[in-house]
Every structure is written in structure tokens, then in C-alpha cells.
Amino acid sequence: MLKVTNLEAGYGGSIVLHGVSLEVKDGEAVVLLGPNGHGKTTLLRTISGLIRPSAGRIEFDGKVLSNMSPAEIVAAGVVHIPQGDLPFPELTVLENLLMGAYLPEAWKQRKQKLEQVYELFPVLRERSNQLARTLSGGERRMLALGRGLMSNARLLIVDEPSLGLAPFLIEEVYRKIHDINKKGGLSVLLADENADHIAGFADRVYLLEMGSIVSEGSAEEMLKNEALLAAYLG
Amino acid sequence: MIQEESFSRRSAVAHVAERLKPSAVPWSRPSVVPVVIVLLISLALPWIADLTPFGKFVLHLMILFFLWGIVVEGWNLIMGVSGIFSFAQVALFAVGAWTSGVITQQLGWSPFVAMWFGPVAATVVAVILGLPTLRLRGAYVVLLTLGFQELFRNFTTQGPNFVAGGGYGLRYVPKFPFEGWVGGDKAQFLYYYLALVFFVIATFAIWRIFYSPIGMAFRALRDSEVYAISRGVSPFRYKLFLFGFVAFFTGWAGAFYVHWYGAISPAIMLFGTTINLLAMIVIGGWGSFWGPIAGCAVLTVLPEVMRAVEQYRILLLGIVLALVAIFAPEGLFPLLLRWVRRLLGRKG
Amino acid sequence: MEKLIQAIYGGIVYGSIFGMMALGLTLIWGALRMLNLAHGSLYLVGTYIAWALVTLLKVPMVPALLLAAVGAAVVGFGMQTLFLNRILGKPGWDVGSLIVGVGVGMALDQSILLTFGPRVKQMPPLIPGVYKIGRVVINYNFLVVVAVAVISLVLLSLFLSKSRYGLAIQAVSQQPDAAQLMGIPTRTVFLIVMCISAALAGLAGALLSTVYQVQRESGANAMLMALVVTIFGGLGSVKGTIWAAYLIGLLQSFLMVYLGAGTALPGVFLFMMLMLVIRPSGLFGLGEARRL
């Protein structure tokens, strides 16, 4: 479904990613593990078109994403839920969600989508007329996920869904993403910096260090290999 | 103990020197020759110009260049270096002019005494203006300083008669008594030399600040407020100091202007003057030291020689301004320098 | 009593016009983070288009007003595509956009001067006639101006808060990164905002030309008041801007009626500076940190 080959990208003159290759298959949940500041976010932002790659190729269902604008990439079905949620603070929860369905195709189905999102995250229904900036951290995370789901996504990219949340909330968020993946049938590419929550969630795992993939494998194998994880994630 | 202190001082110097190219700290390697040559030419200029039929006109232009040059250097220092977008520089110039002018007119003091009150008043006004504004974001500084200029223009148009002169501003302000000293044509020479002295002093002072460690701190401020704060540079206090410092010279130029021209009209504070000065800085290259001065020279001479097509000049200037901001944001002067260096085969 | 009515009435007229001008400025600030100093020139473009259409080509008032708005929008479109898009999103945008605004404004003002000459011009009122309450004279033309201004303000607020595109404008203003990730084409949104803002300025210019004389200085004056209003409302806040417009309008009108015309401008500016000292984020400043 998503195929990244030999991707190089960075900011300004400095290159952060040195020839990264990875793949997400239909319906898979793939987790990108790696310490902070080693290029996870850069990789995800490059896939969703916010950063132009300097070399390499990104393909999605046979379409080449590398030259598309972020809007075209969303239209193609790749939706990125950014690190730190980035809600629209002065819009209500409902308006935030509607903006997730901005593109014409999604906009037509916004009513059904809204119902689906409310069903998955009942708290958003309760808060629907509140300004997004008044939400708690956990609610904001739900809003970010819900907003992403309002689109016609087929691949959901999630950047550090555990960031800044209490442990019990992290578990809940992962459970939701698991449901989205397994029940909703969306492929997921998720980045995180520790392996604590991904057992039973991930199908496959990539280890990213210093802008390169250093190891990959099925989640079971990788998580068993504690020495490897300890070496890279500490 | 003493040794340690000198060591730390030396290491501090080394630290600064390491981050700066030698050319960035010019007083450590003063390039005496060009400075002396330029100074000698400046000193000789009135006598040379006097040989030509348009000598008076040249001196007039030079004095204008010196005065606006002071304003532009100062504005460049606060805008280009520390990112204070003040649109009240012409108003500060006017504060200096009005203060000194009113003192000579109402109290009958000599211009040589009064002219010191102009810069002081401008500094005080700048500090009062800066206290509420310089903590705010750039956009607010633009708005507030624009507002202040409008307010002061209003005051000088509609204020009490000894300020507004019935809407004409100040007229018949006592000039410097040069004509009584040397008489007639040679008085212009003395105006020229006085303006030159003002200009040299202001340029030297601003140049020292520009390339001083404080200047470095200012540049750090401009590039990253957060970084500067984290390094212990208090942006507000530095900005306030800088704003007041520059206001002093700006007001000084204003005071000279009023005793040279003998009059000043509130119309000087219309937006056009401000834009013209801004154009000098931007086209010359804001944030570089010599660029705005070059811009000032060109844009002081240009209007005088292009009198006939004045209206098209302004139209063109507007477009050039926008184009420079887009295609040569560092200004034309640095660009030109680079071309010249490339032509000479040196690496820029 | 008559003075009071006159002051309130004047305040509403000024407030409506300030609102139209300031809303355009605030939208641009919100979306593009640009202080558009060409805004007064766009106002002038509207003024002179309306004047030329009505007096030279004998076009009826209503289409003339619309064409003035469209004309200003076209100029705004040109400014965005020819100039601003080239530096959008690059470092140095703050200063660059400010200077582009100054330059374009200067060129526009001067082109208008070259085309129409320096003489002050007169525009016929939208609807002639007056209505009298005691000694207070209510000008029908003023009422129409206020009505048009209020209608356009209401329509614009509805557009911003209810429609898909309006919400997208807000989204881009508040969180451009996330808006991009939702598939909102930010550059198109910027262009739309610029056109709306310019159209508002043009319409305001055309409307006011029926009240005051048509002259070059009016653009700069209108922009200055609009700047004051945007400060008051808190840069970038739509609701705050509209409230602030009427507040400043009333303040100016009261000063004029009770203390004389000369006190209006200084009074308003002093009030603004006080306000900034006490509440730097404006009346309804957004939650975002306004201080550096």
C-alpha cells in the first residue's frame, strides 16, 4: 500500500533521513520505533508532503506521492495526525471535526462520518460545542484522532499518540487506534519512542536510528528481542 | 586571582573573536587609509565644488545627505539589527527640530545652546514611547509608532500657536549665526562642516554599537528572541536603550535641520517622508552597515536630478521597493559588492 | 439631548466604516501574519473606480459600488500572486511583507494621482435628502452607507463562522500546519483572504466617497483609523474588531461633538496607547501569547 524507498530529506541544508525504506501493507499496523530526534517526525512529515524529499520515492497504491501537495496527498487517502495534536484552538470541537472533512469527497459524507467519530469517541459528542482550547490533554488527543478520521483516510499516520498523557490514557488511546485499525480496516503507520504499549497492537516494527532503519521485523520477534530494544531505546 | 581574571577576559575575547571574522570587529583593525581619504575629500569638497557653477547645489545636497543619513543609520540600527519596526523616526526628528526651534524663538537662546535640547527631548519621548510598546510584538510597534507620528503631526498642525504657527509649523526660526561670522556664500561652508561633524560623530557612534558585542546581542535578538532570552540578553532593556540612543541622534539631526533651513512644516511627517527613508534602508540593504548609507546617498540625489519626472519616480520607487523586498531581501548594496568582488576575482 | 443623538449617530456611521476597513486588515493579519500597509491604497482604488464609473461613465450607483469592490479585489489578487506568493513561508516574511505592502501602496497611490490628477472630486450621494429630529439632521445617504456596511459585516461574519470555506480560513489562521494536514490548500486560502479584504476596503472607499470628498489623503486616514481599531480589537480577532470599530467610532464622534473636531484624533490615539499599556492583547485578543 505505502512504499517508501531510499528516502532522503531534511531541513534547510542538513539532511535528517539517510535513505529510509519501509512499507505498510493493506490493513497493517506498522510501528516506527526510535529515540527522540532521530527522524521519526521528519519521516512522517515527508510522507504527508510537508517536507520535500531531496531523494528517494514515496508510493501509495501505485501513485507517486513525492511530488504532490499535502492537499493532494490527503485526497489520495493518506492522513497525518500530527504530534502535539495541533487542534484549531478557537474553533469548537464540532468545527474542528468538520475541518477534518474539508476535501469535497469527505465533505459530502460528513454527517455519517461525524456519527462514526462520535460513536468511537463519545466524549467528543459531549464537548461538541466547546472551544478546542478548553479541552483536557486526553480529550485533545481524541479530537485529533477524530479529526483525522473525518477524512477519507485509508492510511492513518499517527505521530507519538502517547506524548504527554498519563499511562491509563495512553492505553485507551492505543486501544482506540487498535479498533480503528482492526475493526475499521484502516492501515496505520505509527511512530513512538518506547515499546511499552505496542504489544498486541503492532503487526510489524521498524527501528529508526540516526535517520536510518537499523532493524525491522514482525512485532513478536522484535519485542522478544529485549537486548535490541534496550540497545536502541534505552 | 588577578591572573585568573585576565585569563577569563582573554578567553572571552577569544570566544568573541572566534565567532567573528576579523572584518566584523573593524576597530581592532581600523582600515585607516580609506577613512582618511574619505575624510579629506569631505573636507576639501566645498572648495572643490565652489569652482563649479553648481557648487551651492552640491553643498545643499550634501547637507541633506548628512542629515537624512543620520536618521537612516539610526533607523537601520534599530530596525535592521534589533528588529524594532519604528515608524516614528521622522516624528523623533521633528521632536528635535521643534524643541530646539521653539526654545530659540520663545526664550531667545542661541541655536548653539538650544540644539542640545532637541536630542534630549527626542530621547525622552522615545523612552516614554518605548516603555509600553517595545515589550509588544513587532506589529504593535509599527501601529503605535505610526500612531505617535500622526499624533505629533496633529499637534504641530493644530496645537498652540507657538508650536503650530497657524498650521504652517515653525517659520523664521533663528539660524546658526554663520552669516554674521563669515558672510554670504562662505556661510554655506560652515553649515556643511557642522553637518559633516554631526554626521561623522553619529556614524562613528552607531558604527561602534553596530559592531560591538552589544550589537552582536542585538543581532541575536533579531534572529531568535527565544535564544537571546535563554542566553540572558534582556530584549526589552536593550531595545529601550537602543531606541533612546538612536532617538538622540535623530533629534540632533532635526535640531540642525531647523536652524539650517530656518523653518519646518508639519508636512514633513506625512507618510511620504517615512517611506522615502524606508526605501533608502531597504534598497541599500537593511541590516548591513554601509548599504543604507549608500541608499541614502542615491535617494537624496535622485529626486533632485529627476525633478522633471518626479511623479514617475515615486511610482517607480514603490515598485522597486516591493521587488527588492522579494528578489534581493538583503538589499542592492550588498548584492553590488558581491558582484564587484566576483568581477575582481575574489571570493565573496 | 440633540448633541447626544448626534454623537451616537455619528459614532454608528464611523463605526460601520471603520469596521469594514479594520476587518480586512485583521483577516490578513490572522491568516498571513502580514500587516498590510497597502490597505489604504486599496481603499483609494475603490474610491476612484466608483467615482470614475458614476461621474464619467454614468453607471448607476449599485453596480458602481460592486465594481469598485471587484476592482480592489483584482488589485489585491495581483499583489498576492505577483509579489507576496514569492516570499510566502520563507524567512524574513515579517519585514518582507511589510515592505511589499508599503511599496505596492506607494505605487498604487501614485498611479491614481497620475491618472486622476491632484484635484479634489465630488461624488453624488447614494440617495439625496435628509430627515430631521429636532435640530439633528439625519442624512439618508449616511443611513444607506451604514446599512450597506452592516450588511456586509454580517454576511462576512456568517461566512466565516458557518461556511466550509470560512471555517477553513479560520483554521488556516489558527493552525496552518494542521490545516495543511487536513487537505486545506493554504495558498488558495491566503489568496481568497486577500481578495475579500481588498474587496472590503474597496467597498468602504466607494461608500465613503459619497460622504466625504474624493481625495488622495483619505486612503491613508482611513487606514490609520483601521489600524487603531485592529489594535483595540486584538489583531486577528473578528469579533473584537467589530466591537472595537463601534467603540472607536463612538469615541471619535463624542469627542468631535463635545470637545471639537481637533480633539478626535489625538483623543483616539491616546486612548489606544493607554489601552495597550493596560491590556496589550486587545479587547478580545486571542489566547495566544501576544507579548514577545
Image (tube, coloured by chain):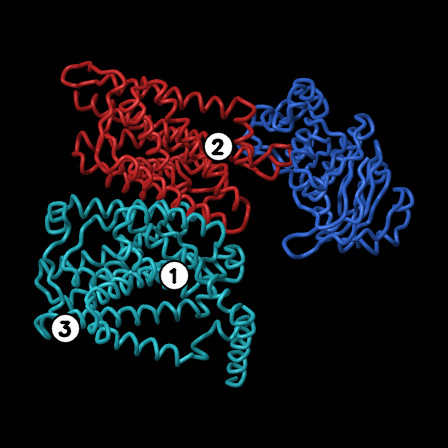
Residue topped by disc 3: B186
Q: Which of marks 3 and 1 is nearer the N terminus?
A: 3
* Residue B148 visible in the shown view: no
Q: State the cyan chain.
A: B
Mark 2 secondary-structure assignment: helix
When the figure is inspected, residue B240 is found, relative to residue C129, above or below; the finding is: below
Residue topped by disc 2: C193
- Image spot of residue C257 (x, y percent): 18, 29
Residue topped by disc 1: B292
Q: Distance between the residues labelled 3 and 2?
A: 60 Å
When the figure is inspected, residue B183 is found, relative to residue A213, above or below; the finding is: below
Numbered disc 3: what chain?
Answer: B
Residue occupying image coordinates x 22% and y 30%: C121
Q: Classify 10 Å Cα crowding around label 2: few (below 14), some (14-19), many (20 and above).
A: many
Q: Distance between the residues labelled 2 and 1?
A: 34 Å
Q: State the blue chain.
A: A
* Residue C216 visible in the shown view: yes
Residue occupying image coordinates x 23% and y 48%: B152
The residue under label 2 is which amino acid type?
Val
Q: Could you say which is closer to the camera, residue B106 or residue C212?
A: C212
The residue under label 1 is which amino acid type?
Pro
Q: State the red chain.
A: C
Q: Are marks 3 and 2 in contact (CB under 8 Å)?
A: no
- Left or right: where does residue A164 sit relative to residue C15? right
Mark 1 secondary-structure assignment: helix
When the figure is inspected, residue A130 is found, relative to residue C190, above or below; the finding is: above
- Image spot of residue C30 (x, y percent): 48, 37
* Residue under disc 3 on the same chain as residue under disc 1: yes
- Image spot of residue A37 (x, y percent): 70, 53
The residue under label 3 is which amino acid type?
Lys
Q: Classify 10 Å Cα crowding around label 3: few (below 14), some (14-19), many (20 and above).
A: some
Numbered disc 2: what chain?
Answer: C
